[in-house]
Amino acid sequence: MMACLSGLAGMWFYYQGLRYIPARRATLVELTFPVFAATVNWMFLGQTLSFYQIVGGLVLLTGNLGLQLRENKVVQPASATLTKQQA
């Protein structure tokens, strides 16, 4: 049951998402797979989470958010520069 909910269903959503988002963003999102697997197990299967699992999940999510924000800062100036050069 746990493999079907957190593994199979999660991977199905992941591959469906690859149709719509770039691979570099999918790689960052893939890093959060353990967090979402633990969340699904906690919400639907009643598994308990330890303090260290919660802290680890927060570290992963914070790191992922930081990488996403950094990626957005790097990509936006480059596209703005291209727009100025094209004009």
Image: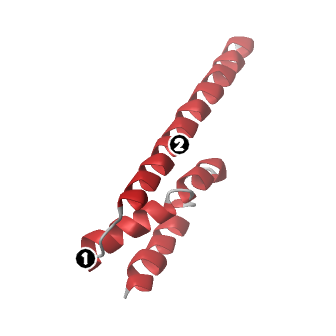
**In front of the other: 51 or 70:** 51
Coloured how?
A: secondary structure
Image x and y of residue 51, in percent: 36, 58
Is residue 36 among what the camera can see?
Answer: yes
Q: Which mark is residue 63?
A: 2
Image x and y of residue 15, in percent: 55, 68
Q: Which mark is residue 17?
A: none
Q: Specify few, some or many for label 2: CA neighbours under 10 Å numbering under 14, 14-19, or 20 or more.
A: some
Q: Which numbered disc, 1 or 2, marks the residue that appears first in the sequence?
A: 1
Please name the amino acid that badge 1 sits on. Answer: Gly
Quadrant position of residue 74: top right
Image x and y of residue 85, in percent: 74, 13
Image x and y of residue 61, in percent: 46, 48
Q: Which residue is mark 1?
A: 46
Picture layout, residue 73 above or below residue 25: above
Q: Is residue 25 left or right of residue 52?
A: right
